[in-house]
Image: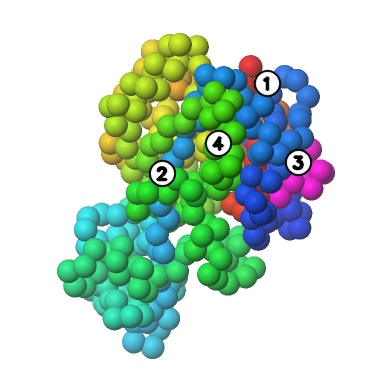
Amino acid sequence: MRVDLFDFELPSENIALRPVSPRHAARMLVVPGEAAFGDATVADLPRLLRRGDVLVFNDTRVIPARLEGRRGEAKIGATLHKRVDLRRWQAFVKNAKRLRIGERVEFPAGVSAVAESRAPDGSFVLAFDGDEPVEVLLDRAGKMPLPPYIAAKRPTDERDLTDYQTMFAEEDGAVAAPTAALHFTPELMESLASAGIATETLTLHVGAGTFLPVKADDTDDHAMHAEFGRIDAKTAARLNAVRAAGGRLISVGTTVLRLLESATDEDGTIKPFEGDTSIFITPGYSFRAIDGLMTNFHLPKSTLFMLVSALMGRDRMQAAYTHAIGEGYRFYSYGDSSLLIPS
């Protein structure tokens, strides 16, 4: 399909630079398969779902993966996006023309790394000096990797250390937050439990590739980035049991959806999974694992807007986004939410 079919105009004032407080006070656009759109809030979620439904969350934790350093007199910025092993990470490098293979970059707090090679996506493989895990080094020298559309408008600050982390964050490894889950609070979780709505977690380490623009003119020519995910056998069994009993699996975020779809076979059985997924979901895809999706509003011509268009229909999502823009919904990572329930 032509990529420009997924374009739309978004006024800059609709882009959120901070989350609302409390988090569950964010607005939520309810998009059913055929009925009229509904304007609600995230706090309304317990009444919008059914007893026996299960919300599936991503428990990845965002690491401070943005580094600013020098190679001689040249300023070098690096955003880590995918672990290679204990000492090496792939990184998108700013001012890459000033960095050659074999050269060392000096970052703050005594952290340094050598540009070891180039990855197929054009990023560098950085090999960090020393014996400490890279995550420990990042805690000393790194900054939270805010999305480009926020970082371009304001600097990262102390608030982002908590604002850009979900309450489910346990497994270190993401360089972007699974933003749909940013709206959840302990109070909301209590309300959901009282309404008979259960929860499960899995892990997908969101990479910086999620923000890369689609440069191809046709979706068939786009190379999707890969991210590491894991679903253990017990979680897979519980999720299968929910669907067998007539409950619905509601994915909290596109990261959860992509991992579940990657782990599900043709008859709809969710299998244990551990490894990379580069699944690219566009209209025409037949969903096997999920029955609904809670997600924030996405960038025009992005792989994520293509994904929600595959779930609900492109015309339906274009109409939903037109409604959201007109009603002043806040877009992107710190913005409002939507609940998509296909027919």
135 horizontally vs 97: left or right: left
Residue holding disc 4: 190
- Residue closer to the observer: 252 or 209: 252
Residue 119 position, x and y percent, is: 31, 56
Dot 1 crowding, Cα within 10 Å, few <14, some 14–19, many 20+: some
10 horizontally vs 341: left or right: right
Name the amino acid type tagged 3. Answer: Ala
Label 3 to label 4, Cα distance in Å? 28 Å
Q: Magenta segment, which residues?
A: 323-330
Name the amino acid type tagged 4. Answer: Glu
Of badges 2 and 4, the one in the foreground is 4
Q: Which mark, by number, is residue 33?
A: 1
- Residue closer to the observer: 236 or 7: 236
Q: Which mark, by number, is residue 324?
A: 3
* Residue at 42% over, 28% down: 261
Dot 2 crowding, Cα within 10 Å, few <14, some 14–19, many 20+: many
Marks 3 & 4, CB-CB < 8 Å contact: no
- Residue closer to the observer: 40 or 264: 40
**Mark closest to the chain's N terminus, 3 or 4:** 4
Residue 304 position, x and y percent, is: 55, 40
67 horizontally vs 301: left or right: left
* Residue at 24% over, 63% down: 133
Label 3 to label 1, Cα distance in Å? 16 Å
* Residue at 42% over, 75% down: 68
Residue 16 position, x and y percent, is: 68, 56
**Mark closest to the chain's N terminus, 2 or 4:** 2
Q: Which mark, by number, is residue 136?
A: none
Residue holding disc 2: 59
Label 2 to label 1, Cα distance in Å? 29 Å
Of badges 2 and 1, the one in the foreground is 2
- Residue closer to the observer: 267 or 178: 178
Q: Circle 1 — which element?
A: loop
